[in-house]
Structure formats: structure tokens, C-alpha cells
Image (tube, rainbow, N blue to C red):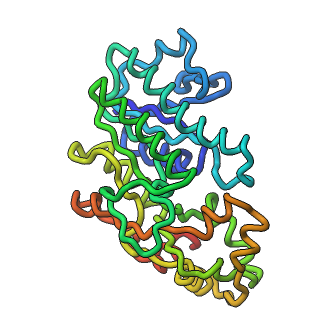
Amino acid sequence: MKILISGASGLVGTHLIPVLEAKGHEIFRLVRKTPRGADEIQWDAGKGFSDAEQGKLENFAAVVHLAGDNVASENWSDDKKRRIRESRVVGTRVLVDALKKAENPPKVFVSASASGFYGSRKDEILTEDSAKGAGFLPDVCDEWEAEARKAEEFGARVVNPRIGVVLAKDGGALEKMLTPFKLGVGGVVGSGKQWMPWIALDDLLGVIIFALENEDLKGAVNTIAPEIVTNEEFTKTLGKAINRPTILPIPAFAIKLLYGEMGETLLLQGQRMTPKKLQEAGFEFQFPNLEDALKHVLD
């Protein structure tokens, strides 16, 4: 397939592209800077495409839309919240509007979403049919997915992977956790009872490819491993994987003091999700077990 990818320079994009190319697909990247080759198309996530770049959006079989401002890079000031929302909601709107203008628009639109859609739900088991949560991230995810669904207007099959914590050694949350854990100062965050939906990077790439190829998969898809664990269970398993103690807890008040709303939302809240759609569709996880996933990622 001829596939267009946004967020190609991010953690997921940089690993996804070589896998797709190895399968024989022709990959093009959306970039913000001046294109360096024929496989790059320039765009502005807030404004759109020039006429010249718009003309390059023809005959794509599929689009994988991964672009979005990093939610965990800094505390959530009003400006940071604006960037988080606009990079996702406005960016998706701009891309879908541009694809609508193509004479031959894509048949598949895989547009990332996040586990944050569900907000803080304690022990409630969450499937794709569960309602949206309350708060900033649930609202952003809801708007983000709504903009992606507009691709159905030009006949695309839309898939929104609601992605949990991605386990990768060279980026994402795990990379940030490793330093304190290796120093022996890693520990449970807050009560440790909050659920922590996770997925190994290899399985996330597999889900995206499965979404591209499986014509029956559409709508929101919980993109997390079948084994859902609490923060306490995750902490103990990570400590075991790197042979380090996990005896220094981080109290909730410290998280709130240091990281404000961002820390409270991302570290103290959790979602007890289940990958119902993926399992019903027959997707086979390579790493359904956390201990095995961590050993693979860290090996």
C-alpha cells in the first residue's frame, strides 16, 4: 500500500516505518520543515497545506495519523493545554479536510487516541463501549476522535487506537522510569492501586498494521495488553526485571506539588481497560504478560 504517516519522527513512527517498508509498503511522511525528498510532504498542523503540497495527497491507500504534542513533557499551564488540544484536535481536522479534497482519498484512516479518554474510573472495567470520562484529557480525546471520524465522509474506514503506556527502551514513559529504578530509588507512586494500562511497542506496531489490514476493525480500539496491572504490580515487576529494590514510595502530595494537574492525571489516575475488540477480532499479542514484555524491551 501507499501509506501516509504523520508523527513519523516520534517514538511510534520511527519504529513503525521500517516495519511497514519491510512488508513492501510505500511510505510517505508528513513533515513541518522543508521536505528533504520526494517521500516527504510539508504541512502545518494549525493551518494546513500549500496548493503544491495539497496536490501530493492523491492515491494514498491509508493514512496513519500519530502527530500530537507530548502530554508529559512539562506541567500543564494554560498554554501547554492549548498546545496539547490544538495539536490533536485542530491537527486532525486540518488533515481530514485536506484529504477530503483529494480526487482519490484514502480508504483507511488510523488516527491515534489515548487511554486518557476514560479518565479516572478506579476499578471499573472499561471496554470500547464505556462512556467518556470527565476532565481535560477525556475531553481532548473525545474531540480528537470526533475529528478523525469525519474521514468517514469520504468513505474511509476509521480506526482510533486508544493507546496505553507504551513500553519501549528508547522513549516514552519507561525510559524516564528507568533512571531512578536503576539507582534503587524507584517505588510505588501514590497509593499504587491505580490501574496502569500498558502495551509493548512491538504489539502497538502490530495493532496498527492489523488495523490497516483488517477490514472489519473500525472505531475506537483499546490498544493495551490483556494483562492489566496496578502501579504497585508494575513497580514490583520492573524492579524484578532490572534486579533493583523498589522500596521508596512517592507520595501523592509530592506528585501534585511537583507536577500539578499533569502529574495527578498521568501518574495518580488510571484505567482498568480490556482489549475487547482486538481479542474478538483475533489479534494475537506477542507480549500479553508484563514480565515477559519488560524482559523483551530491556534485553
Q: Is residue 137 above or below residue 271?
A: above
Query: In percent of the image, x 42 and y 70: which residue is there?
Result: 272
Does 240 sit left or right of 182 as displayed? left
Q: Is residue 208 above or below residue 158?
A: below
Q: Is residue 120 above or below residue 216?
A: below
Q: Residue furthest top?
A: 51
Image coords of residue 45 (percent x, y):
59, 28
> Which of the pair 89/45 is nearer the observer?
89
Query: In percent of the image, x 74 and y 84: which residue is there?
Result: 184
> Which of the pair 263/286 is nearer the observer?
263
Does 278 sit left or right of 216 as displayed? right
Quarter of image, res 226? bottom left
Query: In percent of the image, x 42 and y 44: which residue is there?
Result: 20
> Which of the pair 252/176 is nearer the observer?
252
Q: Is residue 133 above or below residue 182?
A: above
Does 197 sit left or right of 247 as displayed? left
Q: Residue furthest front?
A: 134
Image coords of residue 130 (percent x, y):
34, 59
Image coords of residue 180 (percent x, y):
74, 76
Quarter of image, res 32? top right
Quadrant holding the N terminus: top left
Quarter of image, res 267? bottom right
Query: How many labels, in total?
Result: 0
Image coords of residue 281 (percent x, y):
22, 57
